[in-house]
Image (cartoon, helix red, strand yellow):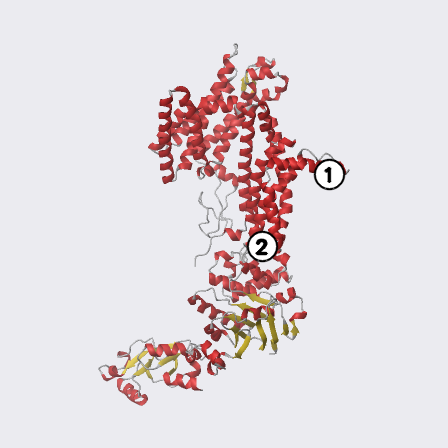
Amino acid sequence: MKTKVPICPACKKELPEDATQCVYCAAEVTKPKFREIFSWKVSDRFFLFSVILLFTTFFLPWFPGQFLYRDEPFSAFQMLLSMYDLEVEFLESFNILRMSQMVPLFAIVVFFLIYIGDYLKKTPYPGLFMFVIFLIGAIPFFFDNFSKVNAWVLTAALFVVLFYYYKSGMTKGTIGRTSYYMFFVFFLISLFLYLFHLSQGFYTQLDAIHINETYGFFSAWIIVSAMIVVAFFRYMVSVEDFWCLLGVFVFSLIAYSTVVQPLFVSGPLRFFADNFSKTGIQTVAHLKIVGIALGIAIVAGVPLGVYITRHPVAAKTVLYISSILITIPSIAMFGFMMPILSSIDQNLDVVQGIGIGTVPAVTALALYSLLPIIRNTYIALQSVDTSMIEAGIGMGMTSFQLLVRVELPLAAPIIMAGVRTSVVMGVAIAALAAYIGAGGLGDFVVQGLQRSTNASVLAGAISMGLLAIICDIFLEKAENWVTPTGLKVKQAME
Amino acid sequence: MGTMLKLDKVTKIYPGTDFRAVDELSFELEEGEICILVGPSGCGKTTAMKMINRLHSITSGKIYIDGQDVSSMDTIQLRRRIGYVIQNVGLFPNMTIAENISVIPNLLKWDKRKINERVHSLLEIVNLSAEEYKDRYPRELSGGQQQRIGVARGMAGDPPIMLMDEPFGAIDPTNRDHLQNEFLKIQEKVKKTIVFVTHDIDEAIKMGDKICLLRDGKLIQFASPEEMLTYPKNDFVRDFVGGDRTIKRLNLFSISKVKRDDPPLIKASAGLEEARGTLSEYGTDYLVVVDENGRLAGLAANEDLQGKGETVADVVQRTNAYLDGTASLKEALSEIFTHDTGFLIVVDGDNKVSGWLDTNDIKKALKD
């Protein structure tokens, strides 16, 4: 793709490709969003291209035709379309469902990793993530395959290596970058091994298989191998990086049996793959509960917060009550809601069927979300500089004008922080809503506990964790968005 | 020029106390005058000011603005008619400079074009380029610039009266001096009636047309700065204006009013002989040397004139012992003591010599 030359918005002159400020008139140049994606470095473009290729294998001949009584081999896409004609045992025995879903899923994950790569490199998440994978990947492997003494020695050695890795990474400030690259390589190798694993299971169980007829799967395999090689050389900047990547290479082979296989082949990720549509439905249900509760909490909490800043006597009471509300154990709160709402249900004809399910769940969650919102609104309005209030009143603003034009805009970021706390807390607490029949991702946990299926419990927990993180990232953006520009500008030097 | 502001036995007693924060305060202010409320802390000066726009309620007594009793007016409308500038500026950081200035015009529902014009003209008045500053945010500005915007915002609604609560209190002394001068220049242009609160007597003397000295809520003396310095009413006033009040009075005179118009001039082209004659005529140690156009060229000392050379130009030496006619006598006195010429040369805007003065002239001015 031919990169467009940026043009200054003020004086309409052409600028050098990576200019952020106009060379002629110093106006700020904001690039359109798509340019940010397509102005990646060569290797990033290679990965992007690979992802697209990987995605196309989804539509290449993949399964031998005899599965669906056809003459021609057909693609994973076609398999997914006609999935409902097949029997469950048949799908399970050949891992067919997972095989057909995995390529687009992984293509999306790889794309996402590249897309947020620049952001991830600046955060501690990749380093933390690698640390956890190292521990849960390597230590069980040591204890399974070596004598107890040797396993302890190896574990200690691993800790020493990790300690030096993190120490040098922290001092140089490269921990995010190297960990991200290591994670990327680890992810690709795991993907490669997983594809290998699947194909083995699949192709060895079928006799009449002709690779040239079903090359789609092997194309995917080759593309991933090429990505591993490029990633390996692209990310090797120093000698240290070489050792790190080599370590990850070896580690990936080990960790496949302890991390990837339990997660993908028999664990929660397999659970996701098998319950793909259900996960989607429950996520939406979960978000619905949290969203409605949050809406109610904002509509009630912000005005209440405003009210108590003007009536200090009420402030104590309101904050006290909402503090008490938040200390009630969540399971008890959901329990309270059922009898209370059922009695309303029975005595009023207007509302029906509110004693169980979404309504009590939303009510309880809204009560929980109130405190962070009320408190943050209260603190935010209290912390508005008194001189601004004096100036506003002195100039003849009414109390309402002052609130809308000055106080609320200045308080917005802090109020938004309260909303963020509420949402993250709400996503976690809503898990218990499954107990009173409201559904949501908590269903996986509840059902998993009842049937002793760990995969289901883990799937629920992981998905809620991810949901909370994603919500938090979005709300962080929202926080930045509601912050008045005047508060973000650089302070003048005196 | 009628009476713009009138306080009539205004008293403030805070609820639940017997203490009279302001006790039967009465004074009148002409249109276009700056009245400085000054006094030690806790004297009720801020309370008195805030009663004018009814940020504090009036316990008894009346305040009239342009003949209208403020207690009979709607508070919100009243405040929109009074410019208000406070010590911490209180610019709204979420609004641009233009939005900050147009707060009151917006409240008064002026139309967009008029507001825009007003913002431009106000920024011009406070000496900030409209194009450069109107879309910036308060935090990007220095303290001094913010205070100027604060003043512009106070004037935005074109109020007949402005209240200023220690507007320069939070600014460092160098900038404060500069801002005070700027403000006086602005006042020359806009001629507002201003009530100005400060605890700094020097500021009061410099800025005020009238000074209202308060103690424990009571009016001690209401007079022009000159009167207060020359005839302090009692010991409290004398103490408050300080032992150096004579020196402070010097601030009130400008050089051009005191100078003598016959300086010991000699042209640079004149011969030494002629110069020696002029010197003995005046009896001074130095002669002021000017060029053909009457511009100051320097000084010629007595002993140099006795030496070799043909014209005064050969013996002239450069000098700093001169001041512009608009400078105060305080500065003049300081200059006289800095240089050993014994007198100060007064020049006009073009650097032309217009007069001279020495310590005797200053003494005479203070006696009158």
Say what amino acid the circle numbered 1 marks: Ile
Mark nearer the N terminus (2 vs 1): 1
Residue A387 shows which numbered tag?
Answer: none
- At 59% from the left and 28% from the top, the residue drawn is A444
- Determine the secondary structure under disc 2: helix
Q: CA distance from mark 2 to mark 1?
A: 39 Å
- At 63% from the left and 50% from the top, the residue drawn is A304
Position above or below: B99 against A239: below
Q: Which residue is mark 1?
A: A344
Position above or below: A264 against A213: below
Task: Give the x, y percent position of residue A248.
Answer: 40, 27
Say what amino acid the circle numbered 2 marks: Glu
- Determine the secondary structure under disc 1: helix
Whether residue B344 sits left or right of residue B115 in the image: it is left
Foreground of the two, A489 or B119: A489
Position above or below: B144 against A36: below
| Residue B285 lies in quadrant | bottom left
Q: Which residue is mark 2?
A: A407
